[in-house]
C-alpha cells in the first residue's frame, strides 16, 4: 500500500497537489460552517433516566427555553431606569415567540437586595424551530440592550451556546495566529531553510482543514460539542507537524545516499511512512475507547478526532511526497557528521540510563507516582459560566448575579416528572425536599416539581437532591432530569464503561505494537511507562484546576472539580500521542538491531537517531497546545495543560530515560514472543523496513 501511495505521489505530483487544494477549499469554505452548529449539551447520555425524562417533557410540555438579562451599575429604583426597564419588558412581551416576561419590579427575587441590579428572565414559546428561535432571541436581546445602564448583559439558553461558539471560533483563530509563526520559527531552526520549514506547515494547514470538514460532516448526523473545535484543531495541527517532521528528517537523510529525488521519496515513504502509518493507527485506536461510552459528546469527539488523525496521516503519506517530488531537489541533504557526533547527547542519555537502570527506575517511577497522586481525589462537574473568561457575556452575567443576589439565584432546578399513578405521599415528600419547590401541571396528567438546589447546579447539594428523590420514589412512576441529574447519570456511565474502554484501547495498542515489533514484552513495557506519564500529567491538572494551586498563572481559578470533558479527552489523546514517540524510537531501534544484532547498542542507536525528532516534535506540540491555552476557557485550559505536560513528560523523562533503562533491564528478552505468536508475526506482521539501496555502479578499465 505504501509503495503504491509513493508511486502515485511521485508519478502524478501535480494531480495529488491539486486534489489536496480542493480539499483545503472545502475545509475552509464548507467546513467552517460548523461554528454555527456547536452544542453545549455535553452531559446528555441516551438511554439514561435524565435524558428520557427530558425528551418526554419536550414532547408534552408547552414551555420552551429561556434567556436571562441582568441590569447593573446604578440604583434600580431610579425613575428613569425603571421607565426604560418597563418599556423594554413591554416590547419584549410583544416579540413573536416570547411566552412570558415577568416585571422585575413586581416579582419577588428579581431585584437585588442592595438595589444595584435586577434580573429580567425571558421565557420562550415551546416548539420553535431553530430559525424562529434565533429571530426571537435576537429581537428580545436588542430590545433589552437598548436599556441605558452602565452594564446590561444577556445570556443563557440558546444564547449561551451561541456565545460559547463565537468564543471558540475566536480562540481557534488567535491560537493559529500565535502558534503557526512560532512553529515556523522553530522549524527554521531545526532545518535551517525556509522550504523545509514551510512543508510541515502546509501539512498542518491540511490538518486544520480536515478538522473543520470532519466536524461539519459529523454535525449533519449528531451534535458537535463547543469543545470539539479547539481539541480537534490543536490535535490536527500538532500531529501534522509531527508526521511531516519525521518524514522530512528521513528524506534529508536519504538525500545523503542518493541524488535521485524520486528514489529518496520512495525510501522515505518505505521507511518513515510505515512509522507514520502505525502512529496514525495507534492514535486512532486510542480514541476508540471514547466510542465505548454511550455519550453523544464522547462518541462524536472520538470519531471527529480520529477522522482528523486519518487526514493528517494521509497528508503526510500523499501530499508531502508529492511536494517533495516537485520541490525536494532544492532541499539540502542532512549534514554528514563525524562518526559518533550525530545525536551524541541522546546516546549519552541512553548509555547512562542503561548502565544505571535500577537507579533510574528507583528514582523516576516513584516520582511519577507522586505526581499522579492527586488523581485519586479527582472530581468532575458540569461547570458553569465561571469556566469562561471574564470577557464573555455569559461570565459577566454570572459574576453580576453572584455579586448582587443570594447564592443559588438563577441555578437550574432539579426537575421531577410525576406521572399519573404517583402516590400523593411520595409527591408530598418530594416537595418537602426544598422550601422553594415549585409545582406546575402539564398536559397528560403530568405534574412537574422543580426543586432549586442549594449551591451550584453541579455541587454536592444538587447531586444529593437527585439521589434523595430517586430514593424516595420507590416504585412510583417518577423520573428526575435537569443538569444535576444528567451529571449523576454521566458519572455513573463513566464508572460503568471506563473499564471496557480501557480494555478496548489497551488490547488494540498491544496488537498494533506487537505487529510493529514482533514482541509481547515491548507492548507491555510501553503501556506501563505511558500510564506513568499520563498519570503524572493528569495529577498536575487536578492539582492546578481542581485544587487551585498556581491556577492564577494560567488566568484560571480553582473550581473544586475538573470539567467532565477534560479527563476522558486527556487520557484518550495523550495515550495516542505517547505512542507516536514510542514508535519513532522503536522504529530506529529495530533498524539498528536488524543491522547489527546487538540489543544493547540498538537501544543507544535508536535514541541517537530518533531523539532529536522526538524532542523537536514534543516541543512543537507543546507550542501548539500552549497557544490554545491563551483563550481562557477553563475546560480547554485543562485539556491543553494536560496534553502539554503529557507530551513533555513522555518525550523527556519516559522516552529518554525510562525507555533505555527498561530495555536494558529486559535485554534480549525485550524482543521475545512465544513461537506461535512469532510465526503469526512473521506471516502477518508489519514493521518499518529500510528501503533496499541500489548497488553502486562501478566501471572497470
Image (tube, rainbow, N blue to C red):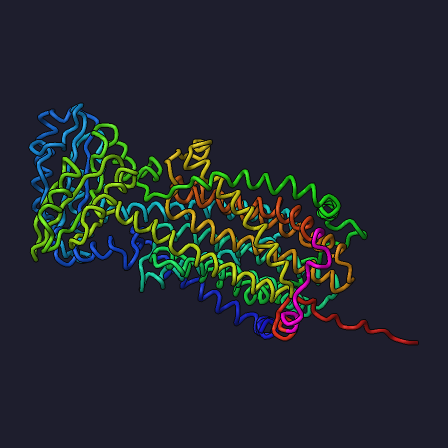
| Horizontal and vertical percent position of residue 259 | 73, 66
The residue drawn where x is 81% and y is 53% is: 339
- Measured as percent of width and height from the top left, residue 457 is found at 26, 40
Q: In terms of image quadrants, where is residue 23?
A: bottom left
In the image, what residue occupies the spot 65% across and 41% down?
362
Image quadrant containing the C terminus: bottom right
Write the residue at 75% across / 45% down: 355
Image quarter where the N terminus lies is: bottom right
Name which residue lies at 28% across and 59% down.
47
* Magenta stretch: helix, strand or loop mostly: helix
Give, as a single range, the part of the protein colored magenta.
664-679
The one nearer the camera, 101 or 579, is 579
Task: Give yes or no for residue 580 being in the magenta stretch.
Answer: no
Q: Is residue 369 above or below residue 267?
A: above
Residue 686, percent across and down? 62, 69
Q: Is residue 26 above or below residue 113?
A: below
Residue 673 sits inside the magenta stretch: yes
In this orientation, does residue 206 appear?
Answer: no
686 displayed left or right of 93: right
Answer with left or right where residue 480 lies relative to residue 496: left
Nearest the eye: 70 or 672: 672
For the residue pair 29 and 675, the one nearer the viewer reads as 675
Amino acid at each position: 500500500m505504501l509503495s503504491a501511495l509513493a508511486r502515485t505521489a511521485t508519478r502524478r505530483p501535480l494531480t495529488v497537489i491539486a486534489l489536496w487544494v480542493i480539499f483545503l477549499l472545502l475545509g475552509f469554505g464548507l467546513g467552517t460552517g460548523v461554528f454555527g452548529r456547536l452544542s453545549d449539551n455535553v452531559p446528555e447520555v441516551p438511554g439514561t433516566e435524565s435524558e428520557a425524562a427530558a425528551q418526554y417533557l419536550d414532547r408534552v410540555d408547552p414551555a420552551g427555553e429561556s434567556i436571562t438579562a441582568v441590569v447593573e451599575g446604578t440604583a434600580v429604583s431610579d425613575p428613569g431606569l425603571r421607565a426604560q426597564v418597563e418599556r423594554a419588558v413591554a416590547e419584549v412581551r410583544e416579540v413573536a415567540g416570547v411566552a412570558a416576561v415577568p416585571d422585575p419590579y413586581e416579582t419577588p427575587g428579581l431585584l437585588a437586595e442592595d438595589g444595584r441590579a435586577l434580573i429580567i428572565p425571558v421565557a420562550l414559546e415551546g416548539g420553535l424551530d431553530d430559525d424562529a428561535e434565533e429571530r426571537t432571541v435576537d429581537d428580545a436581546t436588542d430590545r433589552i440592550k437598548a436599556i441605558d445602564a452602565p452594564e446590561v448583559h444577556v445570556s443563557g439558553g440558546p444564547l449561551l451556546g451561541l456565545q460559547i461558539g463565537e468564543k471558540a471560533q475566536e480562540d481557534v483563530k488567535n491560537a493559529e495566529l500565535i502558534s503557526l509563526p512560532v512553529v515556523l520559527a522553530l522549524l527554521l531552526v531545526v532545518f535551517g531553510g525556509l522550504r523545509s520549514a514551510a512543508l510541515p506547515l502546509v501539512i498542518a494547514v491540511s490538518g486544520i482543514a480536515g478538522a473543520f470538514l470532519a466536524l461539519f460532516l459529523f454535525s449533519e448526523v449528531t451534535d458537535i460539542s463547543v469543545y470539539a473545535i479547539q481539541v480537534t484543531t490543536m490535535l490536527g495541527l500538532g500531529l501534522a507537524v509531527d508526521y511531516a517532521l519525521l518524514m522530512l528528517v528521513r528524506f534529508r537523510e536519504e538525500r545523503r545516499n542518493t541524488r535521485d529525488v524520486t528514489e529518496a521519496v520512495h525510501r522515505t515513504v518505505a521507511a518513515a511512512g510505515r512509522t507514520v502509518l502505525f502512529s496514525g493507527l495507534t492514535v486512532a485506536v486510542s480514541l476508540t475507547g471514547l466510542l465505548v461510552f454511550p455519550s453523544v459528546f464522547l462518541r462524536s469527539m472520538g470519531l471527529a478526532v480520529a477522522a482528523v488523525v486519518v487526514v493528517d496521516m494521509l497528508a503526510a503519506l500523499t501530499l508531502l511526497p508529492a511536494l517533495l517530488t516537485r520541490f525536494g531537489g532544492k532541499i539540502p541533504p542532512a549534514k554528514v557528521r563525524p562518526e559518533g557526533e550525530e545525536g551524541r547527547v541522546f546516546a549519552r542519555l541512553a548509555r547512562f540510563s542503561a548502565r544505571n537502570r535500577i537507579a533510574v527506575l528507583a528514582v523516576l517511577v516513584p516520582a511519577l507516582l507522586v505526581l499522579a497522586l492527586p488523581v485519586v481525589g479527582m472530581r468532575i462537574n458540569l461547570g458553569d459560566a465561571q469556566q469562561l473568561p471574564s470577557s464573555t457575556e455569559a461570565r459577566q452575567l454570572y459574576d453580576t448575579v453572584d455579586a448582587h443576589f443570594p447564592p443559588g439565584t438563577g441555578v437550574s432546578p432539579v426537575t421531577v416528572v410525576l406521572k399519573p399513578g404517583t402516590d400523593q405521599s411520595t409527591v408530598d415528600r418530594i416537595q418537602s425536599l426544598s422550601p422553594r419547590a415549585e409545582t406546575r401541571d402539564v398536559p397528560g396528567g403530568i405534574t412537574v416539581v422543580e426543586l432549586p438546589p442549594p449551591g451550584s447546579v453541579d455541587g454536592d447539594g444538587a447531586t444529593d437532591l437527585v439521589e434523595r428523590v430517586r430514593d424516595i420514589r420507590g416504585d412510583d412512576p417518577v423520573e428526575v432530569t435537569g443538569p444535576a441529574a444528567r451529571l449523576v447519570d454521566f458519572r455513573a456511565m463513566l464508572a460503568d464503561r471506563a473499564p471496557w474502554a480501557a480494555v478496548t484501547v489497551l488490547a488494540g495498542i498491544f496488537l498494533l505494537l506487537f505487529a510493529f515489533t514482533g514482541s509481547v514484552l515491548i507492548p507491555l513495557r510501553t503501556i506501563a511507562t505511558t500510564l506513568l506519564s499520563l498519570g503524572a500529567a493528569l495529577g498536575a491538572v487536578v492539582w492546578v484546576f481542581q485544587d487551585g494551586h498556581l491556577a492564577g498563572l494560567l488566568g484560571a481559578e480553582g473550581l473544586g472539580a475538573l470539567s467532565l470533558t477534560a479527563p476522558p479527552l486527556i487520557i484518550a489523546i495523550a495515550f495516542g500521542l505517547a505512542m507516536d514517540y514510542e514508535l519513532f524510537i522503536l522504529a530506529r531501534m529495530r533498524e539498528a538491531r536488524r543491522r547489527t544484532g546487538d540489543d544493547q547498542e540498538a537501544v543507544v542507536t535508536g535514541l541517537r537517531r530518533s531523539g532529536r525528532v522526538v524532542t523537536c516534535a514534543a516541543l512543537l506540540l507543546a507550542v501548539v497546545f500552549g497557544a490554545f491555552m491563551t483563550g481562557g476557557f477553563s475546560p480547554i485550559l485543562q485539556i491543553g495543560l494536560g496534553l502539554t505536560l503529557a507530551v513533555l513528560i513522555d518525550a523527556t523523562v519516559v522516552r529518554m530515560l525510562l525507555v533505555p533503562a527498561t530495555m536494558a533491564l529486559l535485554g534480549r528478552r525485550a524482543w521475545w514472543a512465544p513461537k506461535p505468536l512469532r510465526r503469526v508475526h512473521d506471516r502477518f506482521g508489519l514493521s518499518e523496513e529500510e528501503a533496499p539501496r541500489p548497488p553502486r555502479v562501478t566501471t572497470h578499465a
